[in-house]
Amino acid sequence: MGELAGRAWLGLTAGAPDARWFWHRQLKKPFFGRFMKPWRWPQGVPADGWERLAIPSASHSTLAAVLKRTAVDAPRGVVVCAHPMGLAAKGFWLRNGHADALLQAGFHVLAFDYNGFGDSPCTNFDWAADSLAAGRAARQLCRGLPVHALCASFGAMNTLNALGAADFPFQRIVAEGCASSLPAFWKSYPFAHAVLRLSRAIAPEGERRLRPELAITRLPAHVRLLLVHSEADHWTPTSHGDRLAAAAPAGAHVERLTLGRAEHTHGMRDEREAYWPAVHDFLTAA
């Protein structure tokens, strides 16, 4: 019933985009309102060599992205970086050293903003479509090269939620701090958790599409996945990784990296000596 009402609302507001996404923005605010602010280039990070991109998404947004090509003569591939929640949005990867490390390792880097974050206009909840759009754009821009995903928390959830889509663009996925489901992630926050329960009642199928522990059951045989969790992560402890790994299809290419002291999404910052060699080896292994 709720989903029928939603489709009717989209029909009535098709010619008025601000009105069309009004209720989506209101529902997002308990979760992401403090992050829905104008984006700034990360302080202290040179902008030289970064190309600005605009990527159309099936979420009805046009995603803001940046691309930098490695100086290595024979690039290994292109890595699409899917950000966690936060004001930094795509800048997370630039300011924390991931982008530089990938470039030095021979990968082109494409970092993008999900709709409603950074410079990407806020539309609906189809962030999985944003992940797919960024991956397909990377493949188009870097023809003939493997396309991989490096993602954290929110970005990891919405990249895994895209599993099973036709023409899935990613060959390898590094998913750090990925929650098994939204309710499991937000259970310590009563208001946000109540909004989730309401959304599940109104649009149960929509809520099910936002559950990585269900999405991972569609992991294709040719896609490799590295799940990264930390024993010091209070948001997505290692139990989330246990649930995700257990839900993967038999014989799937799923690897685990368990850190000891890294805070949520900050393996590179807090335990680079363990995080980066594992990620590098995973992305470059034959």
Image (cartoon, rainbow, N blue to C red):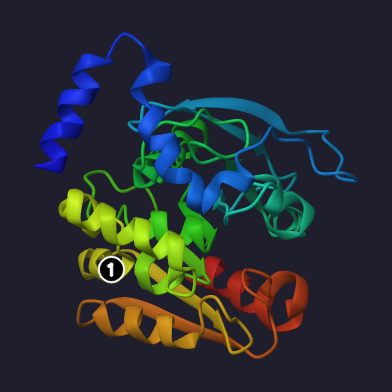
Q: Please tell me which residue is depicted at 62% across the width and 37% down the height of the picture.
A: 118
Image quadrant in which you'd find residue 195: bottom left
Is residue 132 found left or right of 77 in the rendered image?
left
Q: Which of the image's four quarters has the N terminus?
A: top left
Looking at the image, which is closer to me, 24 or 190?
Answer: 190
Q: Please tell me which residue is depicted at 85% across the width and 44% down the height of the picture.
A: 45
Is residue 272 found left or right of 228 in the rendered image?
right
**Is residue 172 something that shows in the picture?**
no
Is residue 212 found left or right of 32 in the rendered image?
left
Residue to which mark 1 is pinned: 216
In the current view of this chain or complex, which residue is farthest to the top?
Answer: 15
Picture coordinates of residue 15 (x, y %)? 31, 8
Is residue 273 found left or right of 164 in the rendered image?
right
Looking at the image, which is closer to me, 137 or 229?
Answer: 229
- Look at the picture and state if 86 lies above or below 5: below
**Is residue 191 something that shows in the picture?**
yes
Number of labels in the image equals: 1
Say what secondary structure mark 1 lies in. helix
Picture coordinates of residue 49 (x, y %)? 78, 33
- Look at the picture and state if 229 lies above or below 16: below
Picture coordinates of residue 14 (x, y %)? 27, 14
Q: Please tell me which residue is depicted at 34% across the width and 78% down the height of the picture.
A: 244
- Look at the picture and state if 33 lies above or below 151: above
